[in-house]
């Protein structure tokens, strides 16, 4: 309720200011404000910082206020109050701040006086925003669209309130549990000069420490070359201070007791210990600069305690220089540390793989969270779908209600946090994230209605249409508002730039005639809702059937389908067309594919009929790993939990020995519903003109009556000769090759044969041999692996009974309706040749996350009246854009101003036709908005003109420089822009 | 080592400023700065405060710095930093501060800029010093001399640094465990207008809550009438905030979440709950003003958290007035709350008894700490003796080294803390207190030497004498530096204003001729050191004998005794005079007293021969109570511990069934050494002209092999018909009547028959019948009672194996030299008629705590040379002052300036001769210093001229007003001042 007002003054102002390019600061923020130390000394960069989780054990607002401190003592409002005061007290002090979700909350409550102080600190480089996203996003379960959005949200706020001095230049992913190459690539495209993080595999760290290669150049894209290179550093001590130098209220380390008149004077001992700590750290790093991260989780609630002691420590340590000490210590920031490293002028090793999976000890693989909380992971992905469609509707209808999209945008920003969509938060907090998304969606639906109110009426005098509403439980065949209605409409907005055909299932309690936008009654088959769906706990619907039909949707546009109740006598007519058999062989077949399932419910074979590719399955179905129980008192006793996946055995158990199968065949639609047991089932569907097979899985309540936690996988075992290799995407974009029991950059010693081979799947995983490729697309982030050649396994759901002792202090034991949580999702299977697969998985994965948005309404008008009053189809485009173009962002930021991102979403060399540069005429996108009168290409986060982006130059050990030419600005005369493979381009557009 | 420099700039400056009388503030501090609320509303005085123990679980310096936070999170430096900043942020905010030991440490480290800010806050009444002692002293185990000193130390600092606006006006004893009437009386004499405390007996509080008499007029002296009256309030909630309104970093209460855009908005609920809390509290108090103590132990380390939430809470609560709420809430101070009560203009009930003992539940009597850590309690008393003598020597020698007395003064100030001398601190902290005293004494010995260097030489060209040193282990017959020496001197400084005869025991390894100041060899008897003394763990001395002799010491002066080794042949001579028998009857007798001990070591009878008073003893000796073991999970499971005395049984066990006795009889000295077992013994001594019997007890190591903690008492069972009554002193001054199983002000329900009858004994306890009185004087504070008529029991030592769960988290289990701690002490027994007892116990108790100070030296001179070079006797007085006059303080504060306190230490009606006003000519005291050229009478703490003292007027329910006439200033023409019984008068004197 309160959230509906949250389009705060600050962000409303910010929208207006977005296109006012910031004035460059001339008073020494950024690198100009850096102390570069003494070239003849060991320079210790002291970086005071706080790590403020945007929700974890408490909700983001509880953290902000410091509520529920019985759960965890943490109050961000006090941290910011306190740090600002401490900066006032000594001009040498510096601080960095990361999470704009919190800073924004705080900023909204400050007086002008305080704001002015803070601005001064920012302009002096003393308060530095680092990373500057709404949160410090997870890297394993996030989608690139939302990573960009959440960073843009923070960047916009910073640019608006502070200008260029506040522009983040450094990635600061100190806590996320493994690091994605795409994240680094995106950071490079945000104009960042480097990235620091705290967590990497313990074996990797060991080797890097020995070889002094904890700092390196990450070549973060196989497509973007030097534009994706990013200096990357593994911090010395996670993100904590060196031992015994923590001065936070949470720490018990000795303060600097420097009054010789009092007892316990300890300056000489403290100085000696610090100098030793500096030398110890320096022995692992390549230069005479080292960084000490002086802070940790929610620290600096009383910043004075930190700074007062650091002031003294640094004074006394530097005083030892007169006695020959080589240690030179000063307040710094990660930027300044980075800049000092850059100025050292040496070459750096590089790498092209990523930092997954992360293990902190031999039994501690953080691969469970790739799947943890699958329902939240799906809801987050669905929310993004709604957010993007809402933005498009707002923009194309010129409704200019960006402020009302903010709550969903903000909720999505929060949900990207590394203890949010990751599934590693406490249950209560997971509920809060979901509630925020839900509340954001509620407000977004208002925008959707306002937009349709402008688009639907055929003339301007027409009264608004009946309100559009979402049916968010359609995945369990429930849409209560339409139940029993005599008529209703379904509008589908297609957010892609291509016309698509799209099958819809509408749960109904009656039979309806369905009319397409041109008024024709279309084939809509009445398919029974499966008994397993009917039994899903909490399902309130009385719908026992669903109408399944095919729709054709224009690019960036909508089609309306009008439902009218049928006369009773017609009912039987339809049903005759659908054949249902039980426990018989079931062949699903269309002109492209043939799916063979035997009478015991085993998927035996899929054949790509056109390409004559056959993939037989030796097994396909659900298995479970027992979650390792343990007290976490040592590596051997590591339990499987929210973060960690540690199976008791490497051989998963099938969930059942028998299956039952129901085969449903209609005109456009065929499916096999395979029940494994009373908590695991799948529906394998093939639509009429589909080139891929849909597998809808339903898992839960996972039984734990045997006191064993269980982790459920869906396994696809084929005879593909995959030769230890499999392929997974990073954040929905580029795909990385994975090799079983192998790490590209170090000599990997295997301990965990299963969990050590798990990788995040954000959108797809494949295996292949010379002429066959099985690709599985997912509807959310999941963990997966190929433990045997020819096999893909994807973890769907988890229920553990032990906490894994990484802080969350709860087993991952999701329940709902007094039972284990039931989760449902989809895989799309593509059987193609390796050379032709990209065409299908690239296109399908974009459409999977940017699905047509279905809204329903109950118009009081008959079809005849409706069709003469309201527009039933519309497209923003006159023609589709090329197939390899994706419209990533279309956001109206003010009356005539838009932020857009367009993307070539194919990688190099994966498709003969589409893995090439493509040209897009931007004006075509804006044909319904007007004529482009001004355009500026921006960096990815839209907070700097790309012509102003100047990144630091680094040189790799093979003497390649990272330097790239500065881009030229776009001319209005030629709005045809080129998109290279995997290139995203960002524009601020003004139309007349 | 460091402590020797601690005569900090601040206090040195302060000494110079002491006589600069402060300018009265005109800018509204004090009562002028008070918000008196709205007469038609319920006015809630919000009092932000911190309670900073001057040592408890950590040492004072650890608390100051925030070191050892693993023991307890607490750092006073941050509290003060933080509060000052928070006061800057909002001019409505107020804060009170109590413990000057901490404030002084902090102030020393502040910049002028910060000092100036703080002064402004003080001058605006926003930072109010309350109580303003060096610490918040214990009330049960402290001596009035040291209470006055510690308050004067704080008051002097405040007056010097801040002037009149910082003068404390309110006693704030929120934590001490029971409240002494003398403390209240002293507060009144310090010019205080009231006293608030947090702890009182739960039965007392219940009754007062029901009758709305938690606030009253305490008539705190039986002698001083209205000058001792003190408004006294029992705080509503100990000293904590009302439930759910604690906003400290240590608390988990909900913050005020007042941004409606965020989740968990809670303003309405918080406001409603607060208003209810205010009404609840108001129902226990008499007026429409109530106080809420917003703080607790070491709170406000992050003051912002407190104030930010209080600001909001108060704003929203007061906003409800527009909706009819009667609650009016504002920042206030205890002074302002008191002033508001005063302005209400009502009458108040009164009481004349005290608030001992304190119980917080039926089994929880805080009577153990009356005795806990008896060695520390004695060391503290001895340290005061040394401090006072050092001051006198410094003053009478005009050495003007007050700065070097400061460390001992400061250590004494700290030792008065309610977890210091009380014995309720952790063992490590007890060691620290002792170390501080020891270090203070070491520096004081320098002053003593400088003083004697001025006093001893007969002419000014004489080189300084050999250094004087203390023999602090003389109580176990150890003085290593003189062992084996051929010659040494013993100087005894008599700090009383009366000539005294005083017996000395000097442990020796050889026999010596002892010469008195006139050169005569005196009778010095060689008495064997008892075997039990020789066996005391840690005793390093080889001395097997002690020389016992009588000295005559001039008032405020010294006598020197010169020791020369005897020729060997003389040794036997001496020994012959001493008769030693074993296990035979032992009658000790002089002209005044006869002490009869049978051959089994039983003290059977003491007879006052002159008065013909006979007191037979049915039993006299050591008993032990088993310490109740318990997990403290409820009243029934309360353990006996550092605070609590809870015996397993009400019948103590005798420590042995048999005793052995050694009877020693010399010329001047007779004693019976009675061994009860190998850990308990007593030596009953009678000196030649003594009018009382000395009992030296030795207890320890207390055995706990049976896993039972033990509390050791010495019991004196007589046939005195004491009729349930006994008498104990308060802080060494006035004596209160105690009645067994009875409380004067409420209907007492007895649960604990022993510990519920224990009272603090700071100097004496007696029982009496119509014509006999047995008075026992103690050398330190102890707990005691009369559990049976005719019986006095005094607890000497305790060793418990359980913590009593009141925070200290350690059993009281003192050890030394790998065994339980051995403690030795003295009782003096007086057998007199009730009407004649005061003469003896008053005089003796003053001499007991102001004992002659023995210093030794090893002069290289023969007696002939020594006696012609050095003065061997000296007195500051030409004649003794009257017997009922005590010189409480004689302190040189600058070259010609002195602070003195003189006292009539007799109570009214206790002695026919001395319980009357007495006149002292102050010039007599200064005859060796010069002519008094200026004099000002001051309030007790010397921080205000008594002519400026204006206390608030209160009226009791019997319509008696507290108003007293303002004293007139003293004229130089008549320096004869009058001292009424129990009156202390304080003067600043300048001499020419």
Image: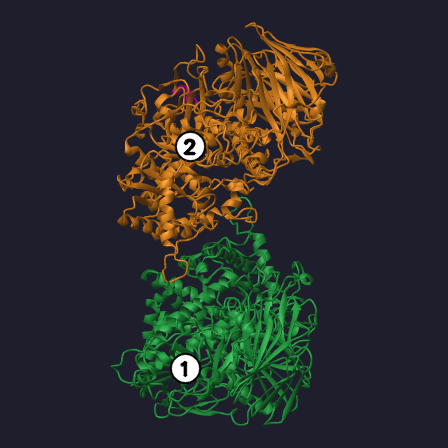
Chain colours: A green, B orange
Q: Secondary structure at mark 1?
A: loop
Pointer 1 chain: A
* Residue at horizontal 41 percent and vertical 47 percent from the top: B245
Q: Nearer the viewer, residue A291 or B749?
A: B749
Q: Are marks 1 and 2 on the same chain?
A: no
Disc marking residue A469: none
The answer to whether residue A25 of the structure is visible from this angle is no
Percent position of residue A928, x then y: 33, 87
Q: Nearer the viewer, mark 1 or mark 2?
A: 1
Let me know if residue B814 is in the magenta part: no
Q: Nearer the viewer, residue A179 or A378?
A: A378
Q: Nearer the viewer, residue B47 or B170?
A: B47
* Quadrant (top left/top right/bottom left/bottom right) for the C terminus of chain A: bottom left
Percent position of residue B346, x then y: 29, 30
Let me know if residue B925 is in the magenta part: yes
Crowd rating for badge 2 (residues with CA inside 10 Å; few <14, some 14–19, many 20+): many
Q: Quadrant of residue A482?
A: bottom left
Percent position of residue B663, x then y: 70, 14
The residue segment tinted magenta is B922-928
- The answer for how far apart the CA atoms under marks 1 and 2 are is 112 Å
Q: Quadrant of residue B464?
A: top right
* Residue at horizontal 46 percent and vertical 56 percent from the top: A301
The residue where tag 1 is placed is A567
The residue where tag 2 is placed is B893
* Quadrant (top left/top right/bottom left/bottom right) for the N terminus of chain A: bottom left
């Amino acid at each position: 309720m309160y959230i509906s007002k949250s389009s705060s003054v600050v962000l409303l102002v910010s929208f207006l200011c977005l296109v006012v390019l910031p004035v460059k600061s001339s008073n020494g923020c950024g690198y100009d404000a850096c102390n570069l130390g003494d070239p003849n000394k060991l320079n210790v960069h002291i970086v005071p910082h706080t790590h403020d989780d945007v929700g974890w054990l408490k909700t983001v607002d509880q953290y902000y206020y410091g509520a529920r401190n019985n759960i965890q003592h943490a109050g961000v409002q006090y941290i910011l109050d306190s740090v600002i005061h401490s900066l006032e007290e000594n001009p040498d002090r510096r601080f960095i701040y990361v999470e704009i979700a919190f800073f924004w909350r705080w900023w909204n409550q400050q007086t002008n006086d305080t704001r002015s102080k803070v601005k001064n600190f920012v302009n002096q480089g003393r308060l530095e925003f680092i990373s500057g996203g709404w949160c410090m996003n997870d890297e394993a379960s996030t989608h690139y669209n939302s990573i960009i959005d959440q960073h843009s949200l923070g960047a916009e706020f910073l640019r608006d309130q502070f200008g260029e001095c506040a522009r983040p230049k450094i990635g600061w992913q100190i806590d996320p549990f493994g690091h994605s190459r795409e994240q680094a690539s995106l950071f490079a495209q945000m104009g960042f000069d480097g990235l620091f993080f705290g967590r990497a595999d313990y074996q990797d760290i060991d080797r890097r420490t020995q070889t002094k290669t904890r700092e390196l150049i990450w070549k973060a894209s196989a497509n973007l070359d030097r534009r994706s290179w990013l200096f990357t550093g593994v911090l010395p001590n996670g993100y904590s201070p060196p031992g015994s130098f923590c001065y936070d209220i949470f720490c018990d380390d000795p303060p600097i007791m420097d009054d010789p008149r009092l007892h316990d004077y300890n300056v000489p001992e403290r100085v000696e210990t610090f100098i030793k700590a500096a030398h110890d750290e320096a022995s692992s790093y390549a230069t005479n600069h080292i960084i000490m991260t002086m802070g940790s989780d929610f620290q600096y609630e009383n910043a004075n305690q930190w700074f007062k002691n650091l002031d003294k420590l640094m004074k006394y340590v530097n005083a030892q220089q007169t006695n020959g000490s080589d240690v030179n210590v000063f307040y710094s920031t990660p930027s300044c540390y980075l800049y000092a490293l850059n100025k050292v002028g040496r070459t750096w090793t590089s790498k092209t793989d990523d930092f997954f999976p992360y293990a902190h000890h031999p039994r501690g693989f953080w691969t469970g969270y790739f799947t943890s909380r699958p329902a939240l992971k799906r809801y987050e992905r669905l929310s993004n779908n709604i957010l993007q469609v809402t933005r498009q509707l707002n923009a194309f209808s010129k409704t200019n209600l960006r402020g009302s999209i903010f709550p969903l945008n903000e909720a999505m920003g929060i949900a990207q946090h590394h203890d949010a969509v990751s599934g590693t938060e406490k249950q209560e907090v997971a509920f809060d994230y979901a509630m925020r998304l839900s509340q954001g969606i509620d407000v977004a639906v208002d925008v959707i209605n306002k937009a349709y109110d402008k688009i639907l009426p055929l003339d301007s005098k027409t009264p608004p249409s009946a309100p559009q509403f979402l049916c968010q439980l359609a995945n369990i065949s429930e849409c209560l508002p339409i139940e029993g209605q005599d008529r209703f409409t379904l509008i589908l907005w297609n957010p892609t730039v291509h016309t698509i055909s799209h099958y819809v299932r509408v749960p109904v309690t009656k039979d309806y005639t369905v009319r397409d936008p041109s008024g024709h009654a279309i084939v809509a088959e009445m398919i029974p809702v499966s008994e397993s769906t009917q039994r899903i706990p909490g399902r309130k619907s009385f719908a026992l059937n669903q109408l399944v039909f095919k729709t054709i949707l224009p690019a960036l546009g909508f089609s309306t389908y009008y439902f009218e109740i049928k006369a009773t006598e017609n009912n039987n007519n339809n049903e005759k067309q659908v054949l249902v058999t039980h426990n018989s062989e079931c062949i699903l077949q269309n002109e492209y594919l043939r799916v063979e399932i035997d009478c015991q419910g085993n998927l035996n074979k899929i054949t790509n009929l056109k390409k004559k590719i056959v993939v037989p399955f030796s097994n396909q179905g659900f298995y479970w790993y027992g979650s390792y129980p343990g007290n976490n008192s040592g590596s051997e006793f590591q339990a499987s939990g929210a973060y960690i996946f540690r199976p008791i055995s490497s051989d998963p158990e099938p969930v059942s020995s028998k299956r039952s199968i129901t085969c449903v065949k209609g005109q456009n639609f065929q499916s096999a519903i395979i029940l494994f047991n009373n908590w695991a089932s799948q529906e394998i569907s093939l639509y009429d003109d589909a080139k891929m097979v849909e597998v809808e899985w339903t898992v839960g309540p996972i039984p734990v009556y045997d006191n064993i936690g269980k982790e459920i996988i869906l396994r696809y075992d084929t005879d593909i000769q995959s030769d230890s290799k499999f392929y997974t995407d990073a954040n929905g974009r580029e795909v990385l090759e994975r090799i079983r029991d192998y790490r590209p950059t170090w000599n990997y010693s295997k301990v965990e044969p299963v969990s050590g081979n798990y990788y995040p799947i954000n959108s797809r995983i494949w295996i292949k041999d010379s002429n066959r490729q099985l690709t599985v697309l997912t509807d959310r982030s999941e963990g997966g692996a190929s433990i045997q050649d020819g096999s893909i396994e994807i973890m769907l759901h988890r229920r553990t009974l032990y906490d894994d002792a990484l802080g969350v202090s709860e087993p991952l034991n999701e329940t709902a309706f007094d039972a284990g949580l039931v989760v449902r999702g989809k895989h799309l299977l593509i059987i193609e040749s390796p050379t032709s697969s990209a065409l299908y998985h690239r296109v399908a994965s974009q459409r999977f996350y940017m699905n047509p948005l279905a809204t329903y309404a109950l118009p009081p008008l008959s079809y005849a009246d409706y069709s003469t009053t309201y527009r039933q189809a519309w497209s923003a485009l006159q023609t589709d854009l090329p197939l390899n173009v994706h419209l990533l962002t279309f956001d109206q930021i003010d009356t005539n101003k838009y932020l857009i991102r367009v993307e070539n979403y194919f990688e190099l060399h994966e498709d003969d036709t589409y893995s090439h540069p493509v040209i897009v005429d931007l004006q075509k996108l804006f044909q319904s908005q007007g004529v482009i009168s001004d355009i500026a290409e921006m960096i990815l986060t839209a907070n700097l003109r790309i012509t102003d982006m100047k990144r630091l130059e680094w040189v790799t050990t093979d003497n390649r420089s990272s330097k790239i030419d500065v881009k030229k600005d776009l001319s209005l005369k030629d709005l045809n822009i080129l998109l290279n493979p995997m290139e995203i381009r960002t524009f601020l557009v003004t139309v007349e």
